[in-house]
Image (spheres, rainbow, N blue to C red):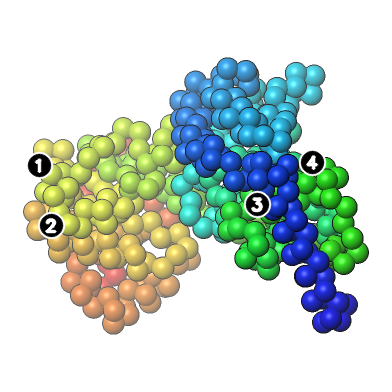
């Protein structure tokens, strides 16, 4: 297609968009400009918070009818023609046992995590990653219909999705999107956003507008002429998304392995500290991690001492992986940063904040806990000029191997700090 053809095609597309916007029975005037539409954003967000809360408290139930999810989806399905039938994907189908979030607790929790991630995140990349994580669970019967939930959380990132929108997209772009597959939805989403960006002056930042446009095409309200249609290499688009999804899956696997090992070492330090008679603190951002049959912070203190809570560096200190506190005095005796694969910089900064910012806890011993193979790397990083002030602290290195081999014996026969010092090495001198 030459430049003249391109310009002519864009002009035809804009003419069709203008015609659609002026059509009183089309979705632009009947739904997108509807005042009640905007009111639903806040209530749906609140409703999804309730869904997450009920699932996590295991009070969600085992049926769609009467659940908090039904309330949310019903309020979406009521939004005129574009969302008519939005509840079909979430209705319990007993013969097929789908969607498998009512009987399978693991899948239910994965669904809650997906919603919670999307409720809390701010960026497009985070939303897409949450979608890919959900897709990796391969939950039977739970597919891109979830995009209708996400639209009300991120209307500038996630377009609504249903049969008519997909049909309209296929007709307009000459594509072959199959309903119900996340990778195909993600590829479609990219093209929809690209098209919306091209015609934003005539559409909206809110992707509900362009979705409504495609919906009306998909329902047959408008016939697409050759000039208005846009041809694309759908197979290439889909291959790109498959490649991105595979790369993201590989990265998640590596991150999950790192997280699992990091959490395991924190769990060892937690159990060891408790067995030696210390009070134990787990980093704020790790408390809810699963360790064994309970949370990682099981049996640990829920608040740091008052002098730390009153300190300006409290939020940083509270992120130190594991702290052991003397039961009688409440003084922090030992602080542990687990550095599985990342730079030691952030951990050192947290320890420095504790050592220099809270003199009441002066005398604490600091440990960097890392894989045996990382000892040379940790020492090299620690010797950098940027850490010159830190070298005044009593910072020591513990290898995973030493901790694994000796933790049970120390728990049985150890003498508090002496036993830990015995399996550690100084990082200075």
Helix, strand or loop for disc 2: loop
Camera-nearest residue between 241 and 103: 241
Q: Nearer the viewer, residue 257 or 176?
A: 176
Is residue 277 visible to the viewer in this orientation of the structure?
Answer: yes
- Residue 381 in picture, x, y percent from top left: 37, 75
Label 3 to label 2: alpha-carbon separation: 55 Å
Q: Is residue 339 above or below residue 119?
A: below
Mark 3 and mark 1 in contact (Cβ < 8 Å)? no
- Which of the two labelled residues, at mark 4 and mark 2, occupies the earlier sequence position? 4
Residue that label 4 marks = 163
Q: Which of the two marks, 1 or 3, is nearer to us in this view?
A: 3
Which image quarter: residue 72?
top right
* Secondary structure of the residue carrying numbered label 1: loop
Determine the residue positioned at 82% across, 82% down.
Answer: 3
- Pick whichever, 117 or 384, lies toward us: 117
**Does any portion of residue 137 appear in the rendered image?**
no
Residue depicted at 50% across the width and 31% down the height? 47
Q: Residue at horizontal 70%, vertical 48%?
A: 212
Q: CA distance from mark 4 to mark 3?
A: 17 Å
| Residue 329 image label | 1
Disc 3 to disc 2: CB gap under 8 Å:
no
Residue bearing mark 3: 209
In front: label 1 or label 4: 4
The residue closer to the viewer here, 334 or 116, is 116
Task: For mark 4, give the secondary structure.
Answer: helix
Query: Which of the 4 image quarters holds residue 387?
Result: bottom left
- The disc at residue 358 is 2
SS for dot 3: helix
User: Where is residue 25 shown, x and y percent of the image?
Assistant: 73, 42
């Amino acid at each position: 297609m030459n430049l003249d053809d391109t310009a002519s095609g864009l002009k035809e597309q804009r003419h069709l968009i203008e015609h659609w916007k002026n059509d009183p029975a089309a979705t632009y005037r009947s739904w997108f400009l509807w005042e009640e539409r905007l009111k639903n954003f806040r209530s749906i967000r609140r409703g999804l918070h309730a869904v997450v809360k009920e699932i996590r408290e295991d009070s969600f139930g085992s049926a769609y009818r009467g659940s908090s999810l039904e309330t949310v989806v019903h309020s979406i399905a009521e939004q005129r023609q574009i969302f008519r039938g939005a509840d079909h994907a979430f209705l319990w189908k007993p013969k097929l046992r789908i969607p498998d979030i009512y009987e399978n607790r693991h899948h239910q929790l994965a669904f809650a995590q997906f919603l919670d991630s999307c409720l809390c995140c701010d960026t497009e990349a985070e939303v897409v990653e949450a979608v890919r994580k959900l897709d990796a669970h391969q939950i039977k019967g739970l597919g891109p219909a979830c995009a209708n939930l996400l639209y009300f959380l991120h209307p500038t990132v996630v377009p609504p999705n249903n049969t008519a929108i997909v049909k309209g997209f296929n007709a307009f772009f000459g594509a072959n999107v199959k309903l119900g597959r996340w990778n195909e939805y993600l590829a479609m989403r990219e093209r929809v956003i690209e098209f919306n960006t091209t015609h934003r002056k005539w559409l909206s930042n809110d992707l509900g507008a362009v979705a409504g446009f495609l919906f009306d095409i998909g329902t047959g309200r408008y016939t697409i002429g050759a000039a208005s249609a846009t041809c694309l290499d759908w197979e290439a688009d889909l291959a790109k998304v498959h490649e991105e999804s595979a790369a993201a899956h590989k990265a998640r696997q590596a991150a999950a392995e790192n997280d699992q090992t990091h959490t395991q070492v924190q769990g060892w330090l937690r159990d060891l500290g408790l067995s030696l008679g210390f009070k134990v603190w787990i980093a704020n951002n790790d408390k809810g991690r699963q360790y064994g049959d309970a949370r990682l912070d099981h049996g640990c203190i829920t608040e740091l001492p008052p002098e730390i809570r009153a300190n300006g560096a409290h939020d940083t200190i509270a992120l130190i992986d594991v702290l052991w506190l003397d039961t009688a005095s409440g003084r922090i005796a030992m602080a542990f940063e687990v550095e599985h694969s990342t730079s030691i910089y952030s951990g050192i900064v947290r320890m420095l904040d504790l050592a220099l910012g809270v003199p009441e806890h002066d005398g604490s011993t600091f440990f960097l806990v890392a894989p045996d193979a990382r000892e040379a790397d940790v020492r090299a990083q620690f010797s950098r000029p940027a850490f010159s002030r830190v070298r005044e602290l009593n910072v020591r290195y513990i290898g995973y191997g030493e901790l694994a081999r000796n933790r049970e014996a120390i728990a049985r026969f150890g003498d508090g700090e002496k036993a830990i010092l015995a399996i550690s090495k100084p990082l200075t001198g």
